[in-house]
């Protein structure tokens, strides 16, 4: 909270460090996957949505419409509601992004994203653990690799391989990635097989 | 910003020229080829009024390379009385004076120097009224 101001009220440690990194997953049908491994996770829902790139063209500055729309589509495809999500990886490029996305994913009412973090609801033993990987701010943000890195964290959690970061009863996880301050958003809901 | 793009954007940056849809009346700034409201492709050019209201703002303390050496400066979203919203620097201001909801107007100012040759690029900035 005492680091250098970058753009009021965001300080240096509110901003994710753009960094180098790589990530990869193997994507294939369930039949083929079974030939390679027993630790399989399944895509339950996947959706994309977009919005204007200019913030000033949006109706609200505190709602990311691409996140709201992509979430509704992904929940519908998966046949789940926000209450069914055991944990999530979200695109916390800046501190405010996590708070707004938490709300727009339907985990709480509008305006409660900040208090949710403060009260520990997003902690590893909270109601909806967020960013057990550390998220973009703590893990780094290798822009092109960030989305797949989120999927890898979901894989490790859903297959019980997350070690000290392991969330209890991790059966369904959600990954929310976005670009252009929410001009586009992709949401995947994955399930332990 | 590269020179050809700067040159093409002079009508909107110098004279606030916007496109008003002939079919539904939606005003697009910068002008568009297709109306985002009704998909019409017929527009008339109008000149926006300079006055508006400050909707939100921040103070940039660490800027991108293009604006290196000019920090700190204020940037805000302004809603003009024509209903058009835009993002712009707020000039000639003591940061303590800034408040959401203040009346502002757009003025003609230098925005940046481009490239090694230092070509002056002009455009609009907001000032408090």
Image (cartoon, grey):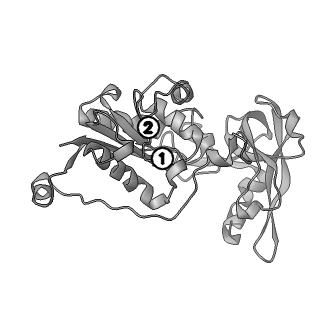
User: Which secondary structure, mark 1?
Assistant: helix
Tell me if label 1 and label 2 are in contact, CB under 8 Å.
yes
In the image, what residue occupies the spot 52% across and 55% down? A140
Q: In terms of sequence position, does the residue under pointer 1 or pointer 2 come before the other?
A: 2
In percent of width and height, residue A142 lies at 49, 60
Chain at tag 1: A
Outermost residue toward the front in this view: A164
Q: Which residue has dot 2 on it? A: A130
In percent of width and height, residue A179 lies at 49, 51
In percent of width and height, residue B106 lies at 81, 44
Query: Would residue A28 be found to the left or right of residue A12 on screen?
Result: left
Q: Which residue has dot 1 on it? A: A135
In the image, what residue occupies the spot 59% across and 48% down? B43
Q: Is residue A103 visible?
A: yes
Mark 1 Cα-neighbour bin, 10 Å: few <14, some 14–19, many ≥20: many
Q: Is residue A48 visible?
A: no
In depth, the one of A114 and B41 nearer the eye is A114
In depth, the one of B119 and A79 nearer the eye is A79
User: Which secondary structure, mark 2?
Assistant: loop
């Amino acid at each position: 909270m005492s680091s250098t101001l970058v753009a009021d009220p965001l300080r240096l440690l509110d901003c994710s460090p753009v960094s180098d990194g790589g990530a990869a997953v193997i994507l294939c049908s369930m039949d083929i996957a079974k030939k390679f491994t027993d630790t399989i996770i399944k895509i339950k829902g996947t959706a994309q949505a977009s919005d204007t790139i200019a913030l000033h063209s949006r109706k609200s500055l505190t709602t990311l419409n691409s996140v709201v729309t992509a979430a509704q589509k992904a929940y519908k495809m998966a046949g789940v509601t926000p209450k069914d999500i055991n944990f999530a990886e979200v695109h916390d490029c800046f501190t405010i992004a996590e708070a707004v996305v938490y709300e727009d994913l339907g985990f709480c009412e509008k305006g409660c994203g900040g208090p949710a973090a403060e009260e520990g609801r997003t902690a590893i033993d909270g109601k909806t653990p967020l960013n057990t990987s550390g998220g973009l701010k703590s893990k780094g943000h290798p822009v092109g690799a960030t989305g797949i890195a989120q999927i890898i964290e979901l894989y490790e959690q859903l297959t019980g391989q997350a070690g000290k970061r392991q969330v209890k009863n991790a059966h369904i996880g959600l990954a929310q990635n976005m670009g252009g301050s929410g001009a586009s958003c992709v949401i995947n809901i994955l399930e332990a097989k | 910003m590269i020179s050809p793009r700067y040159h093409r954007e002079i009508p909107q940056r110098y004279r606030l020229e916007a496109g008003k849809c002939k079919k539904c009346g939606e005003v697009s700034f910068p002008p568009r080829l297709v109306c985002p409201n009704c998909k019409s492709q017929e527009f008339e050019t109008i000149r926006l009024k300079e006055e508006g209201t400050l909707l939100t703002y921040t103070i940039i303390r660490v800027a991108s390379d293009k604006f290196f050496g000019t920090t700190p400066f204020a940037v805000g979203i302004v809603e003009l009385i024509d209903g058009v919203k835009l993002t712009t620097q707020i000039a000639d201001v003591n940061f303590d004076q800034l408040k959401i909801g203040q009346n502002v107007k757009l003025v003609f100012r230098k925005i940046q120097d481009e490239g090694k040759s230092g070509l002056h690029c002009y455009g609009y900035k907001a000032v408090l009224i």
